[in-house]
Amino acid sequence: MAAILLQSQKVSLYQTVMFVQSNIEGIPKGTSWHRDLSMIPLDTAHIGHLTFWCPLQDLSSDNYDSILTFGMGSHRDVTYSTWYPTPLSTDQVQKILVDRYKFGRMSDMKIRDCTAHHGWTYHSAPPQKNGTRCVAYS
């Protein structure tokens, strides 16, 4: 799938990660807005980078599950951060992103579903509902 999306003859796997969004303790912990490539020490300017995110259980936005939200088109706006002072608080980043991008989010995901996004795409995940856990593989 990655080769098709990147229009490439071959691809390389950089890393795999297991994510656990938990609200078992009653303390909501979401994932702040971020771009994956800002944390990956690879020059992908000419070859591209994709992140796949695959839940390991069924998720539903009706149940307030922690499904990724994407800043649509933000991967084409790589230099945006040079126009704002750093560091920015989470609230400041949220306001800037709301003003700059439309947002997209899957409403439901089954255990075999995956999303794929460019490494420069801004994305976040809301806190998981109380007493439950969301586990995903990326």
Image (spheres, grey):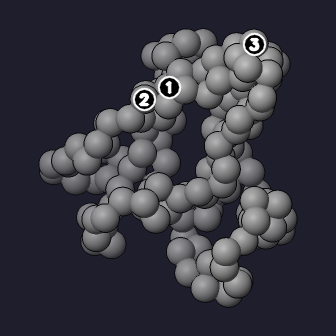
Q: Nearer the viewer, residue 32 or 50?
A: 32
Q: Position of residue 53 (x, y in %)?
A: 48, 34
Q: Earlier in the sequence, mark 2 or mark 1?
A: 2
Q: Are marks 3 and 1 in contact (CB under 8 Å)?
A: no
Characterize the local packing of mark 1: few (<14), some (14-19) or many (20 or more) Cα atoms within 10 angstroms: some
Characterize the local packing of mark 2: few (<14), some (14-19) or many (20 or more) Cα atoms within 10 angstroms: few
Question: What residue is pinned by disc 3?
Answer: 131
Within the image, what quadrant is residue 97 found in? bottom right
Q: CA distance from mark 2 to mark 3?
A: 20 Å
Q: Position of residue 110 (x, y in %)?
A: 56, 15
> Quick check: can you spot residue 88?
yes
Tell me the element at label 1.
strand
Q: Are marks 2 and 1 in contact (CB under 8 Å)?
A: yes
Q: Earlier in the sequence, mark 2 or mark 3?
A: 2
Q: Amino acid at mark 1?
A: Ala
Question: What residue is pinned by disc 2?
Answer: 18
Question: What residue is pinned by disc 1?
Answer: 136
**Relative to 135, is 98 on the left or the right?**
right
**Relative to 55, is 130 on the left or the right?**
right
